Image (tube, coloured by chain):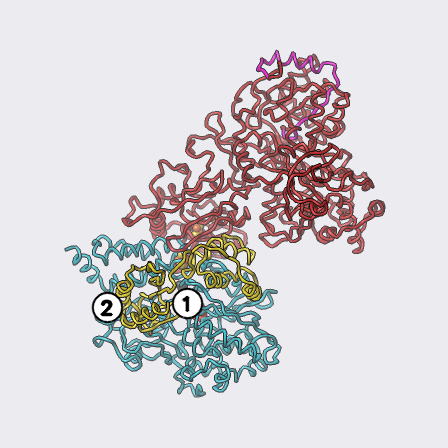
Amino acid sequence: MSAVNHQFSEARLAEIAALTKRYPGNRSAVIPVLHMAQEDFGYLSMELQQHVADTLGLRLMQVREVVTFYTMFREQPSGEYRLEVCTNAGCMLNGANELVAHMCETLGIKVGETTPDGLFTLTEVECAGACAGAPVVQVNNVYHEKVTPESMDALITKMRVKE
Amino acid sequence: MIPSDPQQVKQICFDRINIPHVNQLAIAQKNGAYAFLPTVLQEFESAKIIDEMKISGLRGRGGAGFPTGLKWSFVPRNTGKPTYLLCNADEGEPGTFKDRDIMRFDPHLLIEGMVMAGFALNVRDAYIYVRGEFLHEANVMNEAIREAYAANLLGENILGSGYSMHLTVHRGAGAYICGEETALIESLEGKPGRPRFKPPFPAVEGFYRSPTVVNNVETLASVPAILKHGGAWHAAIGVPNNTGCKIFSVSGHVNNPGNYEVPMGTSLKTLIEEYCGGLQHGTVPKVIIPGGSSTPWLMAEHYDVPLTYDAMAKAGSMLGSGAIIIMDETADVVAFSRRLAHFYAHESCGQCTPCREGTGWIERMMGRIEDGQGSEKDLPVLEQAAKHMAGRTICALADGATAPILSLLQHFPEEVRSRITENRL
Amino acid sequence: MTNLFINDQEVEVAPGTSILEACRQNGVDVPYFCYHPELSVAANCRMCLVEVEGWPKPAASCCTPASEGMKIKTQTETLKTDRKMIMEYLLIHHPLDCPVCDQGGDCKLQDYAMEHGASKGRYVEHKRAVVNYELGPFVNTCMTRCIHCTRCVRFADEVAGTGDIGVLNRSDHMSIAGIVEEALESELSGNLPDICPVGALLDKPSLDVSRPWEMSNHKSTCTQCPNGCDISIESRGDEVMRIRPITGSPEPWICDRGRYVYDAFRSDARILEPALRRGGVLETVGWDEAFEEVVLALKDKRVGILCSPDWSVEGHTAIRLMRDSLFPDAKVSYDLHRRDMRAFAFEEGLAMTTTQIESAEQVVVLGSDLRQRLPLLMQRLRKRAYAGKPVSRIGAMNYRTNMDLSSDVIIRPRDWSSVIARAMDQVRDLGKDAAGFDAWLAAVPERHEAGKVLADALISKSCALLVGEEIRSHHDAAALIAGLDLLMRACGHAEVGNDGRNLIPEGMNTQLLSATFGDVRVSAGELFALASAGELDALIVVGSDPLGDGLFPSAAMAALTRVKMVQIGAIAGKIGRHVDVQLPAAAYSEIEGTFVNMEGRIRVASNPLRSLGQERPLWKVMMRLVQVMGADVPVVSLDELRSEVVKRVPEMAGAWDAVEQDKLLLKPARNRNVKFTPSKNKPAFELDVVSRYSMYREGMWARGSELLSKAAELHRLDDLLVHPDTLQAAGLSAGPMVVRSFLGETKCSVGVREDVSPGVLFVAKRGIAGDLSDLDSATLGGES
Ligand SMILES: Cc1cc2nc3c(=O)[nH]c(=O)nc-3n(C[C@H](O)[C@H](O)[C@H](O)COP(=O)(O)O)c2cc1C
Ligand code: SF4
Ligand code: FES
């Protein structure tokens, strides 16, 4: 996946211009704009980070610091579906580790890896703030709660079929 | 509707939570949302609001339990700089998931609370800092805000009162530390979320070096009821110095995990047995974590502890954000502590030497111990590495990181030792 | 004042002082890593913990303000363990490579480990390795040694203003990294190794060359720009290994030019032996033989003298004494950058100290690439801006500053008079007037809007006017400066105690130079014209390189062929290729001498570094010259020479008394009666030419330094620069073209930049463009 076009669309630029007005300084908009960039282009390549910096009138380093600090920002492409399993306290006490082991088996990959077909990336994440629904799996930022190995398998199958 | 008799009050923030579609303005309004707002904007003065808040005895629901009215009274006036109101919806403390429900089910309650707080503090620009993962919640909030703007409940000259406030939802991007108020401010300024040292306190020099109030979602969501019924009314709920209701996020080995808003002073046991359907296995918990993963563990002897800031402190822990994690007899406390050690090592912002290096060191030691590579000699080192982290850093993350380790060593030394010897064989 | 107790001792500090500063000011040792008095407080190392009576936890002293009655303890059992633990945390990932690390012997981590650390670390886990990053030709990185104090990050943000170093990641993956293209843009990068408390950032040029304990230090003065920073010359034997700033001097930093120029001290360009040109080549000879030749060249001849401002005060006086003894009619030029030698209403030098400039209400920079010219004054302005104080600028280019200017306007040099006139109109409307306004305004038909920026700044209680090279080298400089002087008078900024008239000088010692040579000076251009016209027989060039520097390279070249050239100096420069006789004089690293900087601060340097060859202090060479020419030698000792200095400049009397010296500030000359008004003559060609200065390239020492040449390569811009509109107006597009001027037609290619004023042609002193520095106007045309 090479980054060919790394320019925000006109509509995005308008959205960004409106957004920056919401803050006392442009720099405040960097996280929202990085979210947009990631949504539009999949991941934050160095060129894209430079583009974000230019768009907001920031230095590249100011953007780099933010990108590398926050875990939701990706500097590398990921699978089509990002399966993020919370394995923190509440989820751990309710079978998250077993769920992860099961998912590794189903997908044939280790935690942190992407399936060879580029469909799934499996990661463990910190407390999702939904412990009543433990274990919690976020699929591309959508929460799935009280996930069991069976319900996860069903979900994976559904996603595979959709492709 | 919240009863005006304090004795009958069971819920404050969750009053409307079960009404279907109450996230929609029309339905929320039908159920009392914004009904009292015009009175506040037209008849109340800033000083009166702050007084009512002081009288109410409301303590911040974000974790530290600092009296809200007092916090508001610290904001200097006429500095020539704007005052900002920031709602802390970062909700990252393992075990906490209460603010999420307020936002996704009753967003108008939070908006109303923020307009009232903003009015009291003469705020023009307010922000809700939502953790990045809460995409859905942010969307619900944004939709509610859109409706509120359309109904002139936000924006310029709200309801003709002459007061104007703008509200923006700002999503973070995955960093527990951004729940710490000064880290939140840094993050909202577009920087990595590294806490600032104090003084200066945010009330004096916060967001863009201007006076800033940071309050938790639940704190702000409590404001409409307090102003409607009066500070004294609120002070009569719960027990002295621990007034009002509090949402407890109960998780772990209970049959019905979830959020429960109960008057303060309710006993923990009552909460677990009557509301949460009791433990999954056995009758007494092995470990009680009363206020989120950063608070020291309590043992079964404290099962009956009243849910108040003071009683928790007396028992040797903290009420924190009200995130109760219960472990029953099946729990592997060593593995659990190791998992939390990983969490804190992963979430340390990295600036303070003891926290940056200490959390990583502890994680590695705990990993070794859990994997059976530990030795007796590790235990004093582990304890020292943890002890000297706490209280020597800029923020309290380091203190929180030591809680699970020191609790483990204090209450379960034998389980740790047996892990060491067992796996050696 | 705040009173507090440190270890039971009552002390007094200014309100707002941190506990750590209170301790430092009172000689109480508190260990720290991240704190640096010149940088903002980060409070991240947590080494500076102290105990405060009544507080439950130890406090980081660097970020805790001292308050009235506070009782502080810096040495307790708890603190001892805390410090030991901090050291242990810090050392868990630190490599144990002190024996091969340049910082060894001068390392906070090493020192504190001895003082506060445990004898043995208990960390047995995996150690972290960190990737290095490129930080340019001067800074070596070894990031595994980094302790994350973030001093370098704060330096880049607050001092260099480039913000190119940052903190990546978090937790114990946190690392410091730079963005290289930008890192190279700092003229102060050499300070990074100094502020790094460990061996993560090391001085690259001196890497692995020597260890701190092998070096000896000599206090000296840098003559690479008129700021004249205090420097410590660190040497091993007689070889200079490093130059560093001196703690406690007016500037905590030095620039890369002053720091790295030292490799020119031992370069091939040095003049180390007397030499004569025979059959086209310079041959080394003995002093006597050389002087015989000098006598032949100069005896009973019409002589002109060209000297550099950077010699010591003693050197200049010796030149004057030599002139008076031998060539009483000779004209002297000490400035390669001034076209207009009429008296300036305010002469070169600063009326204010840099500290006063930093704190003035308003600062206006007129026509100066200050970052290149005076990097440390630029730093003061950056500090100002960081504190929210305004700095505005008018000039021919938006020269890069690495800071935010409150206003920044570009103009053509020919518009200066209409800018000033516009400002006069505005201040007069506000009731501020001066007697000369009418005559001055009458001479200027147009008004330029940029004048508003100037007038706006002048309407303030204190205003530092910084007049730069674009005006100083203007052909009508005396009139422009007279206009500015009127403006400053009208607005009350010309009074004693509130004098904001600062004219940035070209070199050191300018306050004394006008006193020493004021009655006999000419511009270098005139001197060369006299030579070319056959009115001179010989030129004595004392440490100046008119072919490489300044505004007259073509004139100098033309003159060369007509006269005999005697060069006296420490370094040969481009002119060295053409001289007939060369006599070696000692470099500033080798002499005892007195220097006056642009603020008028006096520094006496004494450098016991032995000469590398046959060179002698300049004053001795001068006296010997007088002697061999058969005249009476006016002075025979440094003391006698210094009395000659005092005869001309009585204020210098206390200069050699350490106590008096600190009280002395020599203020630049004021010429009250100049009444010059702008000339009505239009420049001959339509584009104004501005000669661009590069700190890495200007000056014979800099050109003799390989290190600076390397940096110059990295900072390279096109030789000629114009605004895109300028090309368009001429109907040209980028590519080969010709510059037409009084020198004829020169082929060239031109770079295009938005930050250059339309109507201006910037020329760099290099290659072909070097020859274009003589121009003050030109046109561009297609190749015919
Ligand atoms: C490491 C750390 C994490 C925190 N996380 C949160 C959080 O997620 N939400 C929150 O409301 N407060 C959090 N806090 C507490 C805030 O710093 C702050 O005290 C709170 O937002 C104040 O609001 P309140 O007065 O309404 O409680 C955290 C504190 C620390 C030290
Ligand atoms: S204690 Fe940890 S998380 Fe808090 S500021 Fe220091 S390094 Fe960051
Ligand atoms: S010097 Fe105070 S924390 Fe580093």
The numbered disc on residue B331 is: 2
- What letter labels the chain drawn in yellow? A
Inter-mark Cα distance, 2 to 1: 28 Å
Chain ID, mark 1:
B
Residue type at tag 1: Glu
Rendered image quadrant of residue A9: bottom right
Q: Mark 2, mark 1: which one is toward the viewer?
A: 1
**Camera-side residue of B245 and C474:** C474
Chain ID, mark 2:
B
**Camera-side residue of B210 and C395:** C395
Based on the picture, tell me whether residue C292 belongs to the magenta stretch: yes
Q: Position of residue B347 (x, y in %)?
A: 38, 60
Residues packed near mark 2 inside 10 Å, few (<14), some (14 to 19) or many (20 plus): some
Q: Can residue C437 be spotted in the picture?
A: yes
- What letter labels the chain drawn in cyan? B
Same-subunit check for callouts 2 and 1: yes
Residue type at tag 2: Ala
> Which residue in the rendered view is the most extreme toward the left?
B425
Q: How many marks?
A: 2
Chain C color in figure: red
Horizontal side, residue C750 vs residue C211: left or right: right
> What is the magenta range?
C282-310
The residue under label 1 is B133
Q: Can residue C54 be spotted in the picture?
A: no
Q: Position of residue C436 (x, y in %)?
A: 83, 45
**Camera-side residue of C71 and B290:** B290
